[in-house]
Every structure is written in structure tokens, then in C-alpha cells.
Image (spheres, helix red, strand yellow):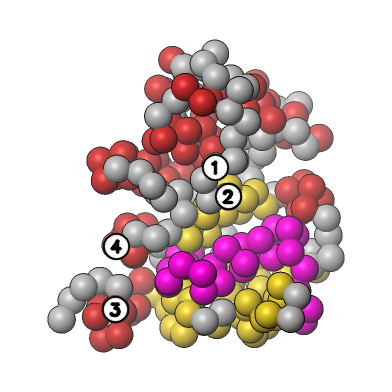
């Protein structure tokens, strides 16, 4: 489905990502984990077309999308929910959600998708006419994820969805992400909470210093001695 092949991404003279390759298969959830500032978001932005690699390529369903503009990438079915959600705070919940369906294919189906996201997030239906700045942090993050779903993605990319949320709210949000997975949508989940990532993802990539240090099926990666000690707190 998605193939990222040996990408090198720079910010000026600084190489932030060096020779990274990852893949996502149909109906699969892939987790990226590792320290903050080590390249996870750069990888995600490159997949979405927000950054362009100096070397390497990104392919989606066999098509080279490396040089496509971000809105063209969305049209193909890749949707990115950035860290912090990036909502329009003075617009209402429903206005923010409809903006997620701006592409030609999604717009004609917006009413059905709106009904679906309100079924998944019923508390947002109760607040559909509230300005987003009046919502709690957890509710704002749910709006951000729901807005991503409004584009009818084939691949949904979530960047640190639990960042800054209380543990109880994080658990509720990640249960919704699990429901999205069960609906068959392929996902990439970059998450600061390694334990939750290892519970949801089918395969995992450890990103350190702009490279892939370790990759494999969930059950194999979580048994790695280094991962246990450095990320799971197991001595």
C-alpha cells in the first residue's frame, strides 16, 4: 500500500532523516516510536508531501507521490492529523469537521461521513455548534481525528494524538483509534506513549537519530532487550 524507500530529508544543511524505509500494508496499523526530535514527524510530513526528500521516494498503491503537492496526496487517500490537532479555534465543531471533506471526492459524501464520525464520537454531536476553543483538550483532539476521517482516508496518519492529555482521556481516545482500526482503515501512529503504541500497532519501527534502529512485528519488538529497558521500563 505505502512504501517509503530510503528517504533523506534535510532542514537546510541538517539531515533530519537518513535513509529511512518503511511500509504499510492494507488494513495494517504501523507504529513509530522513539525520542522526541529524532525524526518521526519529519517522516510523516514527507509521506504527506509537506516536506520533500533530497533522496529516496514515497510510493502509494504503486504510484510515485514524492513530488506531489499535499492536496494531491490527500486526494489519493492519505490524511495527516498533525501533533496538536491544529483546529480553527473560533469555528464550530461541525465547521471544522466539514473542512476535512474539502477534496472533490470527499465533499460530495460529506453528510454521510459526518453521520459516521458523530456515531464514533457521540460527544462531538452534542457540541457540534460550539466553538472549538471552548472544548477540553481531549475533545479538541477527538475533533482533529474526526476531521481526518471526513476525507475518507485510505491511510490515516496520527502524529502524537495523546500529547498533553490526561491518562484517562488518553485511554478513551486510544480506544476510539482502536475502533477506527477495526473498521479496516490503514494507519500510521506516532505516539509518545510507547505502551499504547505497542498495544495498537501490528508492526513497529523504532526511530532514533533520524534512522530506523529496529523494526518488526509487535510481539517481536516488545521483547527486544533494548526496547524493554529504554522504552518500557523493564529491567
Q: Are marks 2 and 4 in contact (CB under 8 Å)?
A: no
Residue ID for mark 2: 82
Q: Nearer the viewer, residue 43 or 11?
A: 11
Rounded to the nearest whole Å, what is the CA distance between mark 1 and mark 2? 5 Å
Rounded to the nearest whole Å, what is the CA distance between mark 4 and mark 1? 22 Å
Q: Residues within 10 Å of mark 4 (few under 14, many from 20)?
A: few
Dot 4 falls on a residue whose secondary structure is: helix
Region of the chain picked out in magenta, as a range: 29-57
User: Is residue 146 in the magenta section?
Assistant: no
Rounded to the nearest whole Å, what is the CA distance between mark 2 and mark 4? 20 Å
Give percent across and percent down for residue 152.
64, 40
Rounded to the nearest whole Å, what is the CA distance between mark 3 and mark 1? 28 Å
Q: Earlier in the sequence, mark 2 or mark 4?
A: 2
Q: Earlier in the sequence, mark 2 or mark 3?
A: 2
Quarter of the rendering occupied by the N terminus: bottom right
Q: State the residue at coordinates (41%, 35%).
A: 137
Residue ID for mark 1: 85
Q: Is residue 108 left or right of residue 221?
A: right
Q: Are marks 3 and 1 in contact (CB under 8 Å)?
A: no
Give percent across and percent down for residue 37.
51, 69
Dot 3 falls on a residue whose secondary structure is: helix
- Is residue 180 positioned above or below 155 on the image? above
Residue 49 seen in this snapshot: yes
Residue ID for mark 4: 195
Q: Residues within 10 Å of mark 3 (few under 14, many from 20)?
A: few
Amino acid at each position: 500500500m505505502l512504501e517509503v524507500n530510503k528517504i533523506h530529508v534535510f532542514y537546510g544543511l541538517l539531515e533530519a532523516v537518513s535513509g529511512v524505509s518503511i511500509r504499510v500494508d492494507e488494513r495494517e496499523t504501523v507504529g513509530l516510536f522513539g525520542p522526541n526530535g529524532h525524526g518521526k514527524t519529519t517522516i510523516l510530513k514527507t509521506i504527506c508531501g509537506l516536506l520533500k526528500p533530497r533522496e529516496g521516494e514515497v510510493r502509494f498503491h504503486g504510484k510515485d507521490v514524492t513530488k506531489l503537492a499535499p492536496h494531491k496526496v490527500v486526494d489519493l487517500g492519505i490524511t495527516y492529523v498533525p501533533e496538536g490537532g491544529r483546529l480553527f479555534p473560533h469555528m464550530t465543531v461541525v465547521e471544522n469537521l466539514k473542512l476535512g471533506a474539502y477534496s472533490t471526492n470527499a465533499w460530495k459524501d460529506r453528510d454521510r461521513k459526518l453521520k459516521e464520525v458523530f456515531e464514533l464520537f457521540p460527544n462531538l454531536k452534542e457540541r457540534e455548534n460550539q466553538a472549538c476553543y471552548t472544548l477540553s483538550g481531549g475533545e479538541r483532539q477527538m475533533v482533529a481525528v474526526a476531521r481526518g476521517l471526513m476525507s475518507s482516508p485510505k491511510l490515516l496518519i496520527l502524529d502524537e494524538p495523546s500529547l498533553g492529555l490526561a491518562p484517562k482521556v488518553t485511554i478513551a481516545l486510544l480506544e476510539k483509534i482502536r475502533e477506527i482500526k477495526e473498521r479496516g482503515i490503514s494507519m500510521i501512529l506516532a505516539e509518545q506513549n510507547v505502551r499504547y503504541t505497542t498495544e495498537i500497532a501490528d508492526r513497529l519501527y523504532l526511530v532514533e537519530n533520524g534512522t530506523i534502529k529496529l523494526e518488526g512485528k509487535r510481539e517481536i519488538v516488545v521483547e527486544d532487550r533494548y526496547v524493554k529497558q529504554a522504552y518500557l521500563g523493564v529491567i
